[in-house]
Image (spheres, grey):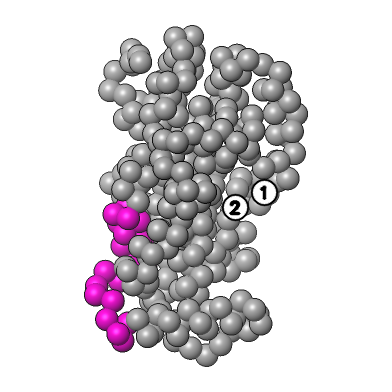
Amino acid sequence: MSRPLYAYFGHHKCASTWIESICESVCHELGIKFKIVYEAKDVDYDLQTYVKDNGIEFLAFANADYEQVNKLGPNVKAFHVVRDPRDIIVSAYYSHLKTHPTHAWPELVQYRKELESLDKDTGLLREIAFRKEQFKEMSSWPNVANTTNILEIKMEDLTASPYDGFIDIFEFLGLVKNEEFNPSLRAKHLISKVFRKIESKVSVNLPVAELQQLPAERLLGIVWEYSFKRISGGRKKGEVDKNSHYRKGISGDWVNELNSEHIEEIRDKYNAVIMKYDYESKPDWSI
């Protein structure tokens, strides 16, 4: 039986870089062809054809609009990560102001200049308006929480318990072997890893039986390699570096950054997406 198309479906400022790095590492060790697509326009709004023509086996769709996802067909095994829209706004503001790369997003250069000309409170209001298309994209998703082929996860839960979270994700995908890492399994993993490394250097497929699943112990090692402390240069979660792409590493920071005017604007424009993903139970929420 052939493998399904594995996929990670994310959204802007939902820990995509971190998640993509872990997925790519897993795929490298399993010999699975991994590819990131940032937006539908990058593939001429035909994601299905792009995946097929490029032989992609694990797709990371960083700004996942459901219209494109739905066209991939039923043979997909995936996980979808969402985040509190209020934290997205705050994270996006600081990222767009200082740290987000511009080489693949030249339009950001001018927008950054605009944010730099504004005080923080006005800049956050501008960012609230700027998130319109993203929150429309997130709202387009149906309820996939109880489907058999897409696992929906809140970023807040994943960052709070990354080891348990990624075990759950890769068990759902069928790509982790949750058993004791015995000498035989360790040897098979080591041989496969060495061959994958050689292949990447010589661009030749070597005749070795590939692992179908990654040992859970190794997956946890990969998650550790991308822990917040390591990728942020040694900071603990909650220690702020506004010049870092990994600014703070905690959830719920919106209560410290947004004022009553911001709250009113967000409730007016984006309450539907906040309620959709159960970040509030009542529409008249406040700080």
Circle 2: residue type? Val
| Residue 156 visible, this orientation | yes
Q: Which mark is residue 42?
A: 1
Q: Looking at this view, is 241 or 79 the one in front?
A: 241
User: 121 left or right of 278?
Assistant: right
In x, y percent, where is residue 245?
A: 57, 41
Q: Give the position of the N terminus as an image quadrant.
A: bottom left
Q: CA distance from mark 2 to mark 1?
A: 7 Å
- Give the residue drawn at x 70%, y 28%: 112
Locate residue 121: give its quadrant.
top right
User: 5 left or right of 117?
Assistant: left
Magenta residues (range)? 163-185
Given the current orientation, which residue lies at the most extreme bottom position? 207
Task: Give the residue number, with chain letter if any, for mark 2.
Answer: 37
Please say if the residues under marks 2 and 1 sit with CB atoms less than 8 Å apart: yes
Q: Which mark is residue 251?
A: none
User: 90 left or right of 111?
Assistant: left
Given the current orientation, which residue lies at the most extreme front position? 234
In x, y percent, where is residue 125?
A: 57, 16
| Residue 11 visible, this orientation | no
In x, y percent, where is residue 14?
A: 47, 40
- Neighbor class of circle 2 (other Cα within 10 Å; few <14, some 14-19, many 20+) is some
Q: Give the position of the C terminus as an image quadrant.
A: top left
Label 1 SS: helix
